[in-house]
Image (cartoon, rainbow, N blue to C red):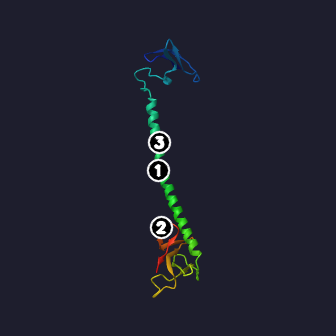
Amino acid sequence: MMKEVIATPNHSIEHGSRHHSTNQSATLSTIEGHEYYTGEASFAPIALHVGSPVIRPIDKGKMKSRSLETAREQAEQQMTLLRKQADLLMQQARKIEERLKLAEEVYGSDMGFEPVVGQTYHLYIRKNGQRALSMIGPDEWGGRSPFEAFAASVRLLGDKTWEAVAAKSDPAGEGLQLIQL
């Protein structure tokens, strides 16, 4: 048994007890410019008596504005994080390119031995312009070096690329700047 309620925003009228099927739908009807609700009281879109929960209208503009502001802040935070990650990846890519370029220079040089991973070697320039890799550092010759110039001290990494341990960068960005002996 359910009570059917006819309600307006200002008052409600209960009609006697009637048996309603749960499939019966409630309706809002407009008569002479006033809305009337007919249906089960618990589903009423307006408060029907003092004990009803407070129904407050939503300011859709404020709600949408706050939601959009929050979405923009979240998106900006995520974009900032992605930019930082992209910058880090670009730095790593540049370092790999530098190591590869150095590896091309070192492997293009004359070497009379097989380099060992983790060891430091020294790259020199001969009088004829050819590069040579040596185990002897520029301070270890004891006298005059047999090479025209010292280019760099390099260390072999596990991925068979090289990193410069001691070298001057070329201001034009075209490779190693030679250090004259």
Crowd band around label 3 with a 10 angstrom C-alpha radius: few (<14), some (14–19), many (20+): few
Q: Which residue is drawn at 45% across and 39% down?
A: 69
**CA separation, marks 1 and 2?**
32 Å
Crowd band around label 1 with a 10 angstrom C-alpha radius: few (<14), some (14–19), many (20+): few
Q: In this view, does 70 lie to the left or right of 127?
A: left
The residue to which callout 2 is attached is 171
Query: Tag 2's secondary structure?
Result: loop
Sequence-wise first label, 1 or 2: 1
Depth check: give the residue in front, 13 or 72. Answer: 72
Residue type of the residue flagged with mark 1: Thr
Q: Residue at x 50, y 76 (%)?
A: 151
Residue type of the residue flagged with mark 2: Pro
The residue to which callout 1 is attached is 80
Crowd band around label 2 with a 10 angstrom C-alpha radius: few (<14), some (14–19), many (20+): few
**CA separation, marks 3 and 1?**
12 Å
Q: Residue at x 54, y 71 (%)?
A: 102
Q: Which residue is drawn at 49% across and 58% down?
A: 88
Query: Tag 1's secondary structure?
Result: helix
Residue 161 place in picture, x, y as percent: 56, 71
Residue at far front of view: 128
Residue type of the residue flagged with mark 3: Arg
The residue to which callout 3 is attached is 72
Circles 3, 1 touching at the beta carbon (< 8 Å): no
On the question of residue 160 being in view, the answer is no
Q: How many marks?
A: 3
Residue 96 place in picture, x, y as percent: 54, 65
